[in-house]
Image (cartoon, grey):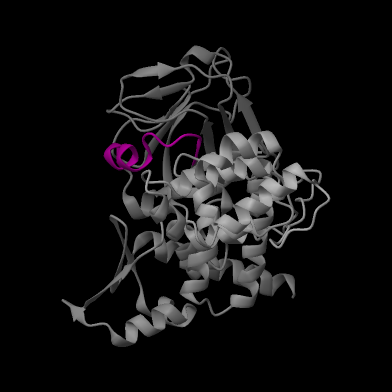
Amino acid sequence: MSQINTKLLERFSNDFAQLLETKYDYNVVVKVGNQNFNLHSLVLYQRSSFFRKELSTATKKNNIIEITLIDTSVEAFKVLIKYIYTGTIAFEEAEPSSIFDLLVPSSKLGFQDNNNFKTLQTFCTDILAKHPNLVFDSDDFSSVQENALITLLKRDDLQIEESKIWDKIIQWGKNDENFLALKTTLDKCIPLIRYFQIPARDIGIKVKPYHKILGSNLWDDIITKIMVPDVSVSSAILPARKKIPVQLPVREAHFVNPSSVINDEHFAEISSVIVAHRYMIGSRDGFTREAFHRLCDNVPGTVVVTKVNNTNEILGGYNPLVWNKQGKYFATTDSFIFSLKTQNLPDSILSRIINTRSAIGCYSDFGPILGGAFYVHNDKKIWLYQHSDSIYEKRLRSDNYSLLIDEFEVFQVLKN
């Protein structure tokens, strides 16, 4: 595919990402758990056979179609709906257990490019097979869907001791001491445990208390094999899971620049961070202190970007902490401000904090304050820049000045 076509597709993806964010002219409300998603029927109809069927039979209330999606977590749906709108997946935005939960709902939603999405499903299970603690040790493991759990248990390369798998499966299925109920709950999981690969001591301590759910034949065969290892038994003996070096699989990253201010080269310039999600756009959300704190407070790790009127300057800064309205400065050694290279400015400048005790200012009467050197102080599009050698190591511009800005964006970021 030519570079021009690739850029065009990226822009289309970016446009649809903004449509998803702004919810402009939405006509569908999808209820997932306790959260509502305001969406667009044309996108859903074209991209998902599940939604196409739902939309064809749904009735409108006040020109809005309501669809309830069950057996899907909110976090998983956030990832999937972004895929529907943009064709991209951001694993960084999903909790580890939500990546696991993608396996079932992704099939249910019936994506038009389903063959490509199977690659995603394989990627998910590859990660989780090699890093099973992401799921098995998560706080919400008990809410993992059965079909997704079975998919993982079938893996020969699941990198976890069989006795721990048994412990976790009992934890997942156990709601009381009723063995009949537990047997019913675990009916599809029980055959996938590799009992003959569990040490005899763990069989006696961990499996024996629940041996009734295995059935008499399987339990007898397990005991027989422990006592006489070379004897033949009628139960299927699954092979030991393969122990392999743990290494994350490689995937091609499809990068979509979500900014209307900075280009792909600028993203590369800010080499210590990766933009993950845009939280605020001044021209959309307003250039007010209230809008900034409402949308950006308590979001860890953010980049602020501004485009200065008439000068073609792009100025910004990085806050590794969170914004709030506590009325004080916070210390950090990791914040910095920057000026990005543009047509009229030959070089980019990255200036790190020196006065670390006053790196990040958080006040209700102000927008973001970066070391007192770069901040917004009212509800107009006026930003103040004032350099001090005791605050930042490098000067971004030749003079201290109040700057009129054309645009203001805030992104959450993830460190490399």
- Quarter holding the N terminus is bottom right
| Residue 307 visible in rendering | no
Q: Position of residue 410 (x, y in %)?
A: 45, 43
Instruction: State how many labels appear.
Output: 0
Magenta run includes residue 293: yes
**Farthest residue, direction right:** 230
Q: In this picture, is 88 found above or below 41? A: above
Q: Position of residue 369 (x, y in %)?
A: 42, 27
Look at 38% across and 34% down and name the residue there: 298
Q: In this picture, is 395 found above or below 302? A: above
Say left or right for 186 vs 226: left
Q: Position of residue 153 (x, y in %)?
A: 62, 56
Between 126 and 262, the one lying in front of the other is 126
- Quarter holding the C terminus is top right
**Farthest residue, direction left:** 62
Q: Position of residue 262 (x, y in %)?
A: 57, 50
Which quadrant would residue 5 be assigned to in this image?
bottom right
Magenta part of the chain = 288-304
| Residue 126 visible in rendering | yes
Look at 53% across and 19% down and name the residue there: 332
Magenta run includes residue 376: no
Between 239 and 236, the one lying in front of the other is 236
Between 14 and 117, the one lying in front of the other is 117
**Farthest residue, direction bottom:** 56
Say left or right for 145 vs 7: left
Look at 67% across and 33% down and name the residue there: 201
Between 343 and 243, the one lying in front of the other is 243
Say left or right for 17 vs 127: left
